[in-house]
Image (spheres, rainbow, N blue to C red):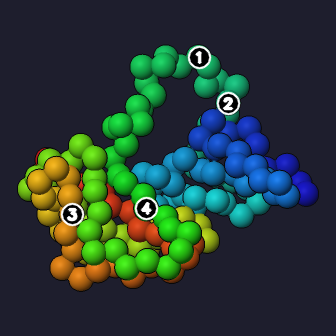
Amino acid sequence: MMPSLCETCENVRAVCTARSKFFLCQLSATNAAYPKYPPQPVVRCDGYRSREYADERSVTQMLPLYHDPHFTFRFADDRIIPRFHLEGVEAGRSVSVFRLDPVTGGRLDRIATVTAGDGGWVDLAEPIMVRAGDGFVAVPEEGT
């Protein structure tokens, strides 16, 4: 296989299994234009940043995990989800819920707009039905 930009990109994390190696694009977490697991090889990417220069940046420029702007839920089994919890999201905050593409991990259609309740619990008017391998992402709206 020809070389891929993912192999040297600072925005990518290699995910290795017993038989395979996948490249997880971390830009996909905040931008639906980037697939979670891009088809290989990648020869052009607007989000590419060489790891060679990554060490030159300050650690203070990194986004701590607890400041992640969204919450991704993936399921190994078929499930019916009537409610879910968003740690650190205050009551009354509006949350958009999107179905995820099981292949790319990118956002698909918006399936609900809800309001977080006490303790960050979100009760859905209609439960979300997911199949094994499916998922959804909950995105709290800014400043609401």
Near mark 4 (Cα within 10 A), the count class, few <14, some 14-19 or many ≥20, is few
Near mark 1 (Cα within 10 A), the count class, few <14, some 14-19 or many ≥20, is few
- Name the residue located 76 percent from the left edge and 43 percent from the top edge: 7
Whether pointer 2 and pointer 4 mark residues with C-beta atoms closer than 8 Å, the reply is no
Mark 1 vs 4, N-terminal side: 1
Mark 3 vs 1, N-terminal side: 1
Q: Is residue 41 above or below residue 97?
A: above
Q: CA gap, disc 1 to disc 4?
A: 33 Å
Q: Is residue 60 above or below residue 36?
A: above
Q: Which residue is mark 3?
A: 122
Say which mark, if any, is on residue 56: 1
Which residue is at the front of the view, 143 or 117?
117
Q: CA gap, disc 4 to disc 3?
A: 13 Å
For label 4, the SS is: strand
- Where the N terminus falls, by quadrant? bottom right
Q: CA gap, disc 3 to disc 1?
A: 41 Å
Q: Hey, what amino acid is under mark 3?
A: Val
For label 2, the SS is: helix
Q: Is residue 102 visible?
A: no
Near mark 2 (Cα within 10 A), the count class, few <14, some 14-19 or many ≥20, is some
Q: Hey, what amino acid is under mark 4?
A: Phe
Mark 2 vs 1, N-terminal side: 2
Q: Is residue 98 visible?
A: yes
Percent across and percent down for residue 21 are 78, 53
